[in-house]
Image (cartoon, rainbow, N blue to C red):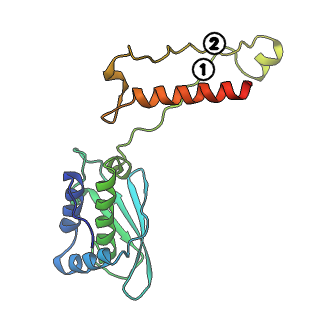
Amino acid sequence: MRRPLRSDEARAVANLAIDLGDPGRMAKARRLHRSNSVSAIDFESGEAHATVTDSDGELHDVTIKVVAPPAQQLPAASDVLTECSCDDAGDSCRHALAAVLGIAEEVEVDARVIDRWTGAEAPAVVATYESPGVGTEAFFSGAWTPNPATPTVPRLSSASTAASLVVDGIDALPVIEDATTAIADGVAHLRR
């Protein structure tokens, strides 16, 4: 038996499935979902991809796209486009609705899934050092200069502010101190 969705975000995604489908398709989608027919869901920026196994064992590829970035965190039915490899001519087939219910379960486990699915996740920024004249010619001509020295990071201590060491609501200082001690012990052991 599946556990009930407790988070507001997960329930909102489940309600999105209800908004996308008619009652008949939604009933079939719930049966598919309850029978574990939704395979692992892959999230890309603005899309979710799943494989749904029909009651006859046929596999269907499903894509749930967020076509308009939501004004709020969760998309509305008008912001979502479903695609499925089945021959159902309706807007959202039972396979797509079952996949949306699978997304709701993923959101229950990790609410950050919504950001990946809707495309709201900030892209990773890679900082690079650019020195004037850096390039092959500059390197071989001797005009190249190495990257500036990396600044030293102050050691963490019990005197550090508690607010700066709270990660996801958990005090990280004891974990960091234990890890630092274990690393120091390991280095000392290697030097023997």
Q: Which residue is mark 1?
A: 129
Residue at image location 66% in from the left, 26% down from the top: 187
**On screen, 138 above or below 6?**
above
Name the image quarter holding residue 95.
bottom left
Q: Residues within 10 Å of mark 1 (few under 14, many from 20)?
A: few
Q: Which residue is mark 2?
A: 148
Is tag 1's residue or tag 2's residue first in the polypeptide sequence?
A: 1
Q: Give the quadrant of the C terminus.
A: top right
Residue at image location 23% in from the left, 79% down from the top: 25
Q: Give the quadrant of the N terminus.
A: bottom left
Check contact, mark 1 vs mark 2: CB within 8 A: yes
* Residue 84 coordinates in the image, percent (x, y): 39, 73
Count of all numbered marks drawn on residues in the image: 2
**Closer to the camera in the image, 157 or 10:** 157
The amino acid marked with disc number 2 is Pro
- Secondary structure under tag 1 reads loop
* Residue 164 coordinates in the image, percent (x, y): 35, 22
Residue sitting at the far bottom: 56
Q: Marks 1 and 2, Cα distance to the nearest angstrom?
A: 8 Å
**Closer to the camera in the image, 37 or 164:** 164
Residue at image location 31% in from the left, 74% down from the top: 33
The amino acid marked with disc number 1 is Tyr
* Residue 18 coordinates in the image, percent (x, y): 19, 68
**Closer to the camera in the image, 18 or 131:** 18
* Residue 89 coordinates in the image, percent (x, y): 31, 80
Q: Residues within 10 Å of mark 2 (few under 14, many from 20)?
A: few
